[in-house]
Image (cartoon, grey):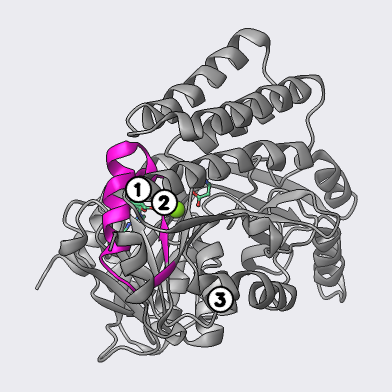
Amino acid sequence: MNQATSRIADQPPLNNTVIAKFGGTSVADFDAMNRSADVVLSNPDVRVVVLSASAGVTNLLVELAEGRETERRDFLLSEIRRIQTAIIDRLEQPDVIREEIERMLENISTLSEAASLATSTALTDELVSHGEIISTLLFVEILRQRHVSAEWFDVRKIMRTNDRFGRAEPDTQILLELAEQQLLPRLQEALIITQGFIGAEPKGRTTTLGRGGSDYTAALLGEALHASRVDIWTDVPGIYTTDPRLVPGAKRIDRIAFEEAAEMATFGAKVLHPATLLPAVRRGIPVFVGSSKDPSAGGTLVCDTTENPPLFRALALRRKQTLLTLHSLSMLHSQGFLAELFNILARHNISVDLITTSEVSVALTLDTTGSTSSGDSLLTTSLLTELSSLCRVEVEENLALIAIIGNKLSQACGVGKEVFGVLDPFNIRMICYGASSYNLCFLVPGDDANQVVQKLHHNLFEQD
Ligand code: ADP
Ligand code: ASP
Ligand code: MG
Protein backbone atom coordinates (compact mmCIF):
# COMPACT_ATOMS: atom_id res chain seq x y z
CA MET A 1 0.00 0.00 0.00
CA ASN A 2 1.49 3.38 -0.92
CA GLN A 3 1.25 6.52 1.22
CA ALA A 4 -1.63 7.91 -0.86
CA THR A 5 -3.99 5.07 -0.05
CA SER A 6 -2.83 4.72 3.54
CA ARG A 7 -3.51 8.40 4.23
CA ILE A 8 -7.16 8.10 3.16
CA ALA A 9 -7.70 4.87 5.08
CA ASP A 10 -6.23 6.43 8.24
CA GLN A 11 -8.37 9.53 8.06
CA PRO A 12 -10.25 10.31 11.25
CA PRO A 13 -13.89 11.47 11.20
CA LEU A 14 -14.39 14.95 9.73
CA ASN A 15 -15.12 16.73 12.99
CA ASN A 16 -11.37 16.79 13.72
CA THR A 17 -10.51 18.76 10.62
CA VAL A 18 -7.45 20.96 10.97
CA ILE A 19 -6.70 23.73 8.46
CA ALA A 20 -2.95 24.29 8.05
CA LYS A 21 -1.71 27.56 6.56
CA PHE A 22 1.86 28.09 5.39
CA GLY A 23 3.21 31.59 4.80
CA GLY A 24 5.63 32.81 2.14
CA THR A 25 8.86 31.66 3.80
CA SER A 26 7.35 28.21 4.40
CA VAL A 27 6.90 27.78 0.63
CA ALA A 28 9.86 29.91 -0.45
CA ASP A 29 11.77 27.13 -2.20
CA PHE A 30 11.91 23.36 -2.73
CA ASP A 31 13.37 22.58 0.70
CA ALA A 32 10.92 24.86 2.53
CA MET A 33 8.01 23.27 0.64
CA ASN A 34 9.22 19.81 1.61
CA ARG A 35 9.56 20.82 5.28
CA SER A 36 6.00 22.14 5.12
CA ALA A 37 4.87 18.90 3.46
CA ASP A 38 6.46 17.00 6.39
CA VAL A 39 4.46 19.13 8.82
CA VAL A 40 1.23 18.40 6.92
CA LEU A 41 1.87 14.68 6.72
CA SER A 42 2.75 14.40 10.40
CA ASN A 43 -0.85 15.20 11.33
CA PRO A 44 -3.58 13.10 9.70
CA ASP A 45 -6.22 15.59 10.90
CA VAL A 46 -4.93 18.19 8.43
CA ARG A 47 -7.41 18.07 5.53
CA VAL A 48 -7.00 21.51 4.01
CA VAL A 49 -3.73 23.29 3.33
CA VAL A 50 -3.81 27.03 2.62
CA LEU A 51 -0.73 28.55 1.01
CA SER A 52 0.75 31.99 0.45
CA ALA A 53 2.84 32.83 -2.59
CA SER A 54 6.54 31.90 -2.37
CA ALA A 55 8.41 34.58 -0.36
CA GLY A 56 9.04 37.72 -2.39
CA VAL A 57 6.71 36.85 -5.26
CA THR A 58 3.76 39.01 -4.13
CA ASN A 59 6.02 42.07 -3.79
CA LEU A 60 7.34 41.50 -7.33
CA LEU A 61 3.79 41.11 -8.66
CA VAL A 62 2.62 44.25 -6.84
CA GLU A 63 5.40 46.22 -8.51
CA LEU A 64 4.48 44.81 -11.93
CA ALA A 65 0.87 45.82 -11.30
CA GLU A 66 2.00 49.41 -10.71
CA GLY A 67 3.02 49.51 -14.39
CA ARG A 68 6.74 49.56 -15.14
CA GLU A 69 8.73 50.33 -18.26
CA THR A 70 10.07 47.40 -20.29
CA GLU A 71 13.49 47.01 -18.72
CA ARG A 72 12.26 46.96 -15.13
CA ARG A 73 9.33 44.75 -16.12
CA ASP A 74 11.66 42.20 -17.70
CA PHE A 75 13.78 42.15 -14.54
CA LEU A 76 10.75 41.61 -12.28
CA LEU A 77 9.42 38.87 -14.55
CA SER A 78 12.79 37.12 -14.60
CA GLU A 79 12.94 37.24 -10.78
CA ILE A 80 9.54 35.54 -10.49
CA ARG A 81 10.61 32.96 -13.07
CA ARG A 82 13.86 32.33 -11.18
CA ILE A 83 12.09 31.70 -7.85
CA GLN A 84 9.47 29.38 -9.33
CA THR A 85 11.60 27.42 -11.79
CA ALA A 86 14.19 26.71 -9.07
CA ILE A 87 11.42 24.65 -7.40
CA ILE A 88 10.34 22.90 -10.62
CA ASP A 89 13.94 21.98 -11.46
CA ARG A 90 14.28 20.01 -8.22
CA LEU A 91 11.17 17.90 -8.81
CA GLU A 92 11.74 14.27 -9.79
CA GLN A 93 9.42 14.70 -12.76
CA PRO A 94 9.55 18.41 -13.56
CA ASP A 95 7.85 18.10 -16.95
CA VAL A 96 4.47 17.21 -15.43
CA ILE A 97 4.09 20.76 -14.18
CA ARG A 98 6.46 22.86 -16.28
CA GLU A 99 3.97 23.63 -19.05
CA GLU A 100 1.28 24.76 -16.64
CA ILE A 101 3.66 27.08 -14.76
CA GLU A 102 4.92 28.45 -18.09
CA ARG A 103 1.30 29.34 -18.94
CA MET A 104 0.98 31.18 -15.63
CA LEU A 105 4.23 33.09 -16.26
CA GLU A 106 2.90 34.03 -19.73
CA ASN A 107 -0.31 35.33 -18.11
CA ILE A 108 1.74 37.41 -15.68
CA SER A 109 3.74 38.87 -18.56
CA THR A 110 0.61 39.77 -20.57
CA LEU A 111 -1.15 41.30 -17.56
CA SER A 112 1.89 43.36 -16.59
CA GLU A 113 2.12 44.76 -20.13
CA ALA A 114 -1.52 45.80 -19.75
CA ALA A 115 -0.67 47.39 -16.38
CA SER A 116 2.07 49.47 -17.96
CA LEU A 117 -0.58 50.98 -20.27
CA ALA A 118 -3.22 51.54 -17.58
CA THR A 119 -3.30 50.37 -13.99
CA SER A 120 -6.45 49.33 -12.17
CA THR A 121 -7.21 47.73 -8.83
CA ALA A 122 -9.01 44.83 -10.55
CA LEU A 123 -6.00 44.20 -12.76
CA THR A 124 -3.69 44.35 -9.71
CA ASP A 125 -5.67 41.64 -7.96
CA GLU A 126 -5.75 39.44 -11.05
CA LEU A 127 -1.98 39.81 -11.40
CA VAL A 128 -1.01 39.24 -7.76
CA SER A 129 -3.29 36.19 -7.47
CA HIS A 130 -0.80 34.32 -9.68
CA GLY A 131 1.62 34.03 -6.76
CA GLU A 132 -0.76 31.85 -4.76
CA ILE A 133 -1.94 29.95 -7.85
CA ILE A 134 1.64 28.96 -8.72
CA SER A 135 2.74 28.05 -5.17
CA THR A 136 -0.28 25.77 -4.74
CA LEU A 137 0.28 24.06 -8.11
CA LEU A 138 3.89 23.36 -7.14
CA PHE A 139 3.01 22.12 -3.66
CA VAL A 140 0.47 19.65 -5.06
CA GLU A 141 3.19 18.28 -7.33
CA ILE A 142 5.62 17.95 -4.42
CA LEU A 143 3.01 15.95 -2.49
CA ARG A 144 2.10 13.80 -5.50
CA GLN A 145 5.73 12.93 -6.04
CA ARG A 146 5.74 11.80 -2.41
CA HIS A 147 2.77 9.54 -3.30
CA VAL A 148 0.23 11.57 -1.38
CA SER A 149 -3.22 11.93 -2.84
CA ALA A 150 -3.44 15.73 -3.05
CA GLU A 151 -5.93 17.86 -4.97
CA TRP A 152 -5.50 21.45 -6.16
CA PHE A 153 -8.59 23.48 -5.32
CA ASP A 154 -9.32 26.97 -6.67
CA VAL A 155 -10.46 28.86 -3.57
CA ARG A 156 -12.18 31.47 -5.78
CA LYS A 157 -14.97 28.92 -6.32
CA ILE A 158 -16.05 29.43 -2.73
CA MET A 159 -14.33 32.59 -1.35
CA ARG A 160 -17.03 35.05 -2.46
CA THR A 161 -16.15 38.65 -1.63
CA ASN A 162 -17.41 42.13 -2.41
CA ASP A 163 -15.71 44.03 -5.24
CA ARG A 164 -13.46 46.22 -3.09
CA PHE A 165 -10.36 45.14 -4.97
CA GLY A 166 -7.19 45.08 -2.89
CA ARG A 167 -9.03 44.82 0.40
CA ALA A 168 -12.12 42.74 -0.34
CA GLU A 169 -14.49 41.57 2.39
CA PRO A 170 -15.74 37.99 2.26
CA ASP A 171 -19.41 37.09 2.39
CA THR A 172 -19.26 34.46 5.11
CA GLN A 173 -22.79 33.14 4.48
CA ILE A 174 -22.12 32.43 0.80
CA LEU A 175 -18.70 31.02 1.70
CA LEU A 176 -20.36 28.64 4.15
CA GLU A 177 -22.88 27.42 1.57
CA LEU A 178 -20.33 27.06 -1.24
CA ALA A 179 -17.80 25.34 1.04
CA GLU A 180 -20.42 22.82 2.10
CA GLN A 181 -21.38 22.09 -1.50
CA GLN A 182 -18.02 22.19 -3.21
CA LEU A 183 -15.27 21.61 -0.68
CA LEU A 184 -16.63 19.47 2.15
CA PRO A 185 -17.41 16.42 -0.06
CA ARG A 186 -13.85 16.48 -1.40
CA LEU A 187 -12.18 16.27 2.00
CA GLN A 188 -12.76 12.51 2.19
CA GLU A 189 -11.13 11.97 -1.20
CA ALA A 190 -7.84 13.78 -0.96
CA LEU A 191 -5.78 16.33 0.88
CA ILE A 192 -6.95 19.73 -0.40
CA ILE A 193 -4.34 22.32 -1.33
CA THR A 194 -5.72 25.79 -1.85
CA GLN A 195 -4.77 29.48 -2.04
CA GLY A 196 -4.81 32.01 0.73
CA PHE A 197 -5.34 35.73 0.12
CA ILE A 198 -7.49 35.53 -3.04
CA GLY A 199 -11.22 35.42 -3.70
CA ALA A 200 -13.76 36.34 -6.35
CA GLU A 201 -16.48 38.99 -6.46
CA PRO A 202 -20.02 38.18 -7.67
CA LYS A 203 -19.10 38.64 -11.36
CA GLY A 204 -16.23 36.19 -10.96
CA ARG A 205 -13.38 38.71 -11.09
CA THR A 206 -10.44 37.92 -8.80
CA THR A 207 -10.12 39.92 -5.57
CA THR A 208 -7.62 39.91 -2.70
CA LEU A 209 -8.13 40.26 1.05
CA GLY A 210 -5.27 42.73 1.70
CA ARG A 211 -1.58 42.05 2.31
CA GLY A 212 -0.94 39.13 4.62
CA GLY A 213 -4.49 37.92 4.00
CA SER A 214 -3.73 34.18 3.82
CA ASP A 215 -4.05 33.86 7.60
CA TYR A 216 -7.56 35.29 7.26
CA THR A 217 -8.40 32.77 4.49
CA ALA A 218 -7.34 29.89 6.74
CA ALA A 219 -9.53 31.12 9.58
CA LEU A 220 -12.49 31.73 7.23
CA LEU A 221 -12.18 28.19 5.85
CA GLY A 222 -11.87 26.92 9.42
CA GLU A 223 -15.17 28.58 10.24
CA ALA A 224 -16.90 27.38 7.05
CA LEU A 225 -15.73 23.78 7.52
CA HIS A 226 -16.30 23.69 11.30
CA ALA A 227 -12.65 22.91 11.82
CA SER A 228 -11.35 21.88 15.22
CA ARG A 229 -8.19 24.01 14.86
CA VAL A 230 -6.41 26.38 12.49
CA ASP A 231 -2.63 26.03 12.36
CA ILE A 232 -0.61 29.01 11.15
CA TRP A 233 2.88 27.84 10.17
CA THR A 234 5.33 30.69 9.73
CA ASP A 235 9.00 31.53 10.34
CA VAL A 236 8.79 32.09 14.12
CA PRO A 237 7.82 29.43 16.67
CA GLY A 238 4.83 31.32 18.05
CA ILE A 239 3.59 34.72 19.14
CA TYR A 240 6.13 36.64 21.20
CA THR A 241 5.89 39.51 23.66
CA THR A 242 7.01 41.66 20.74
CA ASP A 243 8.57 41.11 17.32
CA PRO A 244 11.59 38.88 18.10
CA ARG A 245 13.42 40.40 15.12
CA LEU A 246 13.32 43.78 16.79
CA VAL A 247 13.89 42.66 20.38
CA PRO A 248 16.02 39.54 20.82
CA GLY A 249 14.88 39.31 24.47
CA ALA A 250 11.23 38.84 23.40
CA LYS A 251 9.61 35.82 25.04
CA ARG A 252 7.22 33.34 23.53
CA ILE A 253 3.65 33.40 24.86
CA ASP A 254 2.50 29.78 25.15
CA ARG A 255 -1.22 30.49 25.53
CA ILE A 256 -3.00 33.71 24.76
CA ALA A 257 -6.68 34.69 24.74
CA PHE A 258 -8.43 35.57 21.47
CA GLU A 259 -8.97 39.19 22.54
CA GLU A 260 -5.32 39.76 23.43
CA ALA A 261 -4.02 38.18 20.20
CA ALA A 262 -6.59 40.10 18.15
CA GLU A 263 -5.40 43.37 19.72
CA MET A 264 -1.80 42.43 18.91
CA ALA A 265 -2.67 41.70 15.28
CA THR A 266 -4.72 44.88 14.93
CA PHE A 267 -1.89 46.99 16.28
CA GLY A 268 0.72 45.59 13.94
CA ALA A 269 2.05 42.21 15.15
CA LYS A 270 2.55 40.94 11.60
CA VAL A 271 2.56 37.31 12.70
CA LEU A 272 -1.25 37.29 12.28
CA HIS A 273 -3.35 39.26 9.78
CA PRO A 274 -5.62 41.59 11.81
CA ALA A 275 -8.86 39.89 10.73
CA THR A 276 -7.66 36.32 11.36
CA LEU A 277 -9.22 35.94 14.75
CA LEU A 278 -12.70 37.19 13.83
CA PRO A 279 -13.90 33.87 12.35
CA ALA A 280 -12.01 31.93 15.03
CA VAL A 281 -13.79 33.84 17.80
CA ARG A 282 -17.21 33.44 16.12
CA ARG A 283 -16.80 29.65 16.24
CA GLY A 284 -14.44 29.36 19.21
CA ILE A 285 -11.83 27.64 17.02
CA PRO A 286 -8.35 27.59 18.60
CA VAL A 287 -5.52 28.91 16.45
CA PHE A 288 -2.01 27.51 16.77
CA VAL A 289 1.05 29.48 15.59
CA GLY A 290 4.32 27.62 15.01
CA SER A 291 7.43 27.52 12.83
CA SER A 292 7.53 25.24 9.79
CA LYS A 293 11.34 25.41 10.04
CA ASP A 294 11.28 23.98 13.54
CA PRO A 295 7.91 22.37 14.28
CA SER A 296 9.31 20.58 17.34
CA ALA A 297 9.91 23.97 19.00
CA GLY A 298 6.17 24.15 19.73
CA GLY A 299 4.27 27.40 19.47
CA THR A 300 1.45 29.55 20.77
CA LEU A 301 -2.14 28.46 21.23
CA VAL A 302 -4.68 31.25 20.84
CA CYS A 303 -7.84 30.18 22.63
CA ASP A 304 -10.89 31.25 24.61
CA THR A 305 -9.36 31.94 27.99
CA THR A 306 -6.03 31.82 29.75
CA GLU A 307 -5.15 31.44 33.41
CA ASN A 308 -4.04 34.57 35.29
CA PRO A 309 -3.91 36.97 32.35
CA PRO A 310 -1.04 39.39 33.05
CA LEU A 311 -1.42 43.18 33.26
CA PHE A 312 1.14 43.64 30.43
CA ARG A 313 0.98 40.99 27.70
CA ALA A 314 2.83 42.34 24.67
CA LEU A 315 3.99 45.31 22.62
CA ALA A 316 3.00 45.93 19.04
CA LEU A 317 4.34 48.43 16.56
CA ARG A 318 2.78 49.92 13.45
CA ARG A 319 4.99 52.10 11.29
CA LYS A 320 4.13 54.76 8.69
CA GLN A 321 1.22 56.24 10.59
CA THR A 322 -0.36 59.49 9.48
CA LEU A 323 -1.77 61.93 12.03
CA LEU A 324 -4.43 64.42 10.96
CA THR A 325 -5.07 67.37 13.23
CA LEU A 326 -8.21 69.31 12.41
CA HIS A 327 -8.72 72.77 13.89
CA SER A 328 -11.94 74.71 13.77
CA LEU A 329 -12.97 77.61 15.95
CA SER A 330 -16.57 76.86 15.07
CA MET A 331 -16.20 73.65 17.07
CA LEU A 332 -16.31 75.69 20.26
CA HIS A 333 -19.65 74.99 21.99
CA SER A 334 -21.12 73.85 18.67
CA GLN A 335 -22.93 70.64 17.76
CA GLY A 336 -22.52 68.42 14.77
CA PHE A 337 -18.87 69.14 13.83
CA LEU A 338 -17.69 65.61 14.62
CA ALA A 339 -20.70 64.10 12.83
CA GLU A 340 -19.86 66.09 9.71
CA LEU A 341 -16.19 65.11 9.96
CA PHE A 342 -16.99 61.42 10.31
CA ASN A 343 -19.43 61.65 7.40
CA ILE A 344 -16.67 62.89 5.13
CA LEU A 345 -14.32 60.13 6.27
CA ALA A 346 -17.02 57.49 5.78
CA ARG A 347 -17.74 58.75 2.26
CA HIS A 348 -14.05 58.18 1.50
CA ASN A 349 -14.21 54.66 2.96
CA ILE A 350 -11.86 55.62 5.77
CA SER A 351 -12.16 54.25 9.24
CA VAL A 352 -10.66 56.26 12.04
CA ASP A 353 -8.19 54.46 14.24
CA LEU A 354 -7.18 56.59 17.23
CA ILE A 355 -8.75 59.88 18.20
CA THR A 356 -8.24 62.59 20.80
CA THR A 357 -10.10 65.88 21.06
CA SER A 358 -9.70 69.28 22.64
CA GLU A 359 -12.06 72.24 22.69
CA VAL A 360 -11.26 73.39 19.15
CA SER A 361 -9.34 70.57 17.54
CA VAL A 362 -9.45 66.87 16.85
CA ALA A 363 -6.42 64.67 16.21
CA LEU A 364 -6.88 61.30 14.57
CA THR A 365 -4.99 58.53 12.82
CA LEU A 366 -6.31 56.61 9.85
CA ASP A 367 -6.90 52.90 10.15
CA THR A 368 -4.38 51.20 7.88
CA THR A 369 -4.93 47.66 9.14
CA GLY A 370 -5.31 45.13 6.35
CA SER A 371 -3.63 47.52 3.93
CA THR A 372 -4.58 47.15 0.30
CA SER A 373 -2.69 44.83 -2.02
CA SER A 374 -1.71 47.78 -4.19
CA GLY A 375 -0.31 49.68 -1.20
CA ASP A 376 -2.20 52.87 -2.13
CA SER A 377 -2.26 55.70 0.40
CA LEU A 378 -5.57 56.33 2.15
CA LEU A 379 -4.95 60.05 2.20
CA THR A 380 -6.20 61.18 -1.20
CA THR A 381 -6.30 64.75 -2.55
CA SER A 382 -10.09 64.64 -2.76
CA LEU A 383 -10.33 63.71 0.94
CA LEU A 384 -7.98 66.55 1.93
CA THR A 385 -9.90 69.05 -0.22
CA GLU A 386 -13.20 68.10 1.38
CA LEU A 387 -11.78 68.23 4.91
CA SER A 388 -10.21 71.62 4.22
CA SER A 389 -13.63 73.03 3.36
CA LEU A 390 -14.72 72.17 6.93
CA CYS A 391 -11.65 73.10 8.97
CA ARG A 392 -7.90 73.72 8.95
CA VAL A 393 -6.07 70.44 8.34
CA GLU A 394 -2.55 69.57 9.46
CA VAL A 395 -0.93 66.35 8.27
CA GLU A 396 2.05 64.70 9.98
CA GLU A 397 3.58 61.62 8.44
CA ASN A 398 6.16 59.01 9.40
CA LEU A 399 4.92 58.49 12.93
CA ALA A 400 4.88 55.10 14.64
CA LEU A 401 2.07 53.73 16.72
CA ILE A 402 3.12 51.72 19.73
CA ALA A 403 0.49 49.64 21.49
CA ILE A 404 0.84 48.07 24.89
CA ILE A 405 -1.50 45.10 25.01
CA GLY A 406 -2.64 43.92 28.40
CA ASN A 407 -5.54 43.11 30.66
CA LYS A 408 -7.60 45.48 32.79
CA LEU A 409 -5.10 48.21 31.99
CA SER A 410 -7.57 51.01 32.50
CA GLN A 411 -8.43 49.74 36.00
CA ALA A 412 -4.83 49.39 37.23
CA CYS A 413 -2.84 51.96 39.21
CA GLY A 414 0.69 53.04 38.26
CA VAL A 415 0.42 52.14 34.55
CA GLY A 416 1.34 55.68 33.46
CA LYS A 417 4.52 55.76 35.52
CA GLU A 418 5.62 52.28 34.51
CA VAL A 419 5.12 53.01 30.81
CA PHE A 420 6.16 56.61 30.45
CA GLY A 421 8.73 56.74 33.25
CA VAL A 422 11.37 55.22 30.96
CA LEU A 423 10.40 57.26 27.92
CA ASP A 424 11.42 60.76 28.99
CA PRO A 425 14.01 61.21 26.20
CA PHE A 426 11.26 60.76 23.59
CA ASN A 427 8.52 62.96 22.18
CA ILE A 428 5.19 61.26 22.80
CA ARG A 429 3.00 62.80 20.12
CA MET A 430 -0.43 61.45 21.14
CA ILE A 431 -1.79 59.06 23.78
CA CYS A 432 -4.96 56.95 23.76
CA TYR A 433 -5.90 55.25 26.98
CA GLY A 434 -9.09 54.31 28.74
CA ALA A 435 -11.52 53.35 25.97
CA SER A 436 -10.32 49.75 25.96
CA SER A 437 -9.01 47.91 28.97
CA TYR A 438 -6.87 45.81 26.62
CA ASN A 439 -4.56 48.51 25.28
CA LEU A 440 -2.71 51.74 25.79
CA CYS A 441 -1.44 53.33 22.56
CA PHE A 442 0.74 56.28 21.70
CA LEU A 443 2.48 57.83 18.74
CA VAL A 444 6.20 58.60 18.53
CA PRO A 445 8.36 59.90 15.66
CA GLY A 446 9.02 57.01 13.26
CA ASP A 447 12.80 57.21 13.73
CA ASP A 448 12.50 56.63 17.49
CA ALA A 449 10.16 53.63 17.22
CA ASN A 450 12.73 50.82 17.53
CA GLN A 451 14.40 52.37 20.54
CA VAL A 452 11.09 53.06 22.29
CA VAL A 453 9.95 49.45 21.80
CA GLN A 454 13.29 48.07 23.00
CA LYS A 455 13.33 50.28 26.10
CA LEU A 456 9.73 49.61 26.96
CA HIS A 457 10.08 45.88 26.40
CA HIS A 458 13.09 45.79 28.66
CA ASN A 459 11.19 47.59 31.38
CA LEU A 460 7.89 45.71 31.15
CA PHE A 461 8.96 42.19 30.15
CA GLU A 462 12.64 41.57 30.86
CA GLN A 463 12.78 42.26 34.60
CA ASP A 464 11.77 39.62 37.08
P1 ADP B 1 4.17 34.59 6.92
O1 ADP B 1 4.80 34.91 5.61
O2 ADP B 1 4.44 33.21 7.39
O3 ADP B 1 2.72 34.97 6.98
P2 ADP B 1 4.88 37.03 8.30
O4 ADP B 1 6.16 37.66 7.87
O5 ADP B 1 3.62 37.63 7.79
O6 ADP B 1 4.96 35.49 7.98
O7 ADP B 1 4.80 37.00 9.90
C1 ADP B 1 5.84 36.48 10.66
C2 ADP B 1 6.71 37.61 11.18
O8 ADP B 1 5.95 38.38 12.11
C3 ADP B 1 7.89 37.17 12.01
O9 ADP B 1 9.00 36.88 11.19
C4 ADP B 1 8.14 38.35 12.94
O10 ADP B 1 9.20 39.16 12.50
C5 ADP B 1 6.86 39.17 12.84
N1 ADP B 1 6.27 39.49 14.14
C6 ADP B 1 5.81 40.73 14.49
N2 ADP B 1 5.37 40.74 15.73
C7 ADP B 1 5.50 39.48 16.23
C8 ADP B 1 5.22 38.86 17.48
N3 ADP B 1 4.67 39.54 18.48
N4 ADP B 1 5.50 37.54 17.62
C9 ADP B 1 6.04 36.84 16.60
N5 ADP B 1 6.35 37.37 15.40
C10 ADP B 1 6.09 38.67 15.20
N1 ASP C 1 1.01 36.61 -0.52
C1 ASP C 1 0.22 37.62 0.14
C2 ASP C 1 1.14 38.71 0.72
O1 ASP C 1 2.36 38.62 0.59
C3 ASP C 1 -0.67 37.05 1.20
C4 ASP C 1 0.02 36.39 2.37
O2 ASP C 1 1.20 36.03 2.29
O3 ASP C 1 -0.65 36.18 3.38
O4 ASP C 1 0.64 39.65 1.25
MG1 MG D 1 1.78 36.86 7.16
User: From what the image shows, is residue 148 above or below residue 65?
Assistant: below
| Residue 246, visible in the rendered structure | no
Q: Residue at x 61, y 34 (%)?
A: 62
Ligand 1 quadrant assignment: bottom left
User: From what the image shows, is residue 137 above or below residue 277?
Assistant: above
Residue 379 or 31: which is nearer the viewer?
Answer: 31
Query: Residue 175: which quarter of the image?
Result: bottom right
Start and end of the magenta stretch?
20-47
Q: Of the residues under marks 3 and 1, which one precedes in the sequence?
A: 1
Tell which tag, 3 or 2, sits nearer the viewer: 2
Quickly name the residue at label 1: 26
Is the CB–ligand 2 distance for label 3 below 8 Å?
A: no
Amino acid at pointer 3: Leu
Mark 3 vs mark 2, CA separation in Å: 19 Å
Mark 2 vs mark 1, CA separation in Å: 5 Å
Residue 323 percent across, percent down from the top left: 61, 51
Q: Which mark is residue 278?
A: 3
Quickly name the residue at label 2: 23
| Residue 397, visible in the rendered structure | yes
Seen as rendered, the residue at the extreme top is 71
Residue 421 percent across, percent down from the top left: 27, 65
Residue 46 percent across, percent down from the top left: 38, 70
Residue 90 or 327: which is nearer the viewer?
Answer: 90
Mark 1 Cα within 10 Å, few/some/many (few <14, many 20+)? many
Q: Is residue 151 magenta?
A: no
SS of the residue under disc 1:
helix
Residue 156 horizontal side relative to residue 25, left or right? right
Residue 204 or 45: which is nearer the viewer?
Answer: 45
Location of the C terminus by quadrant is bottom left
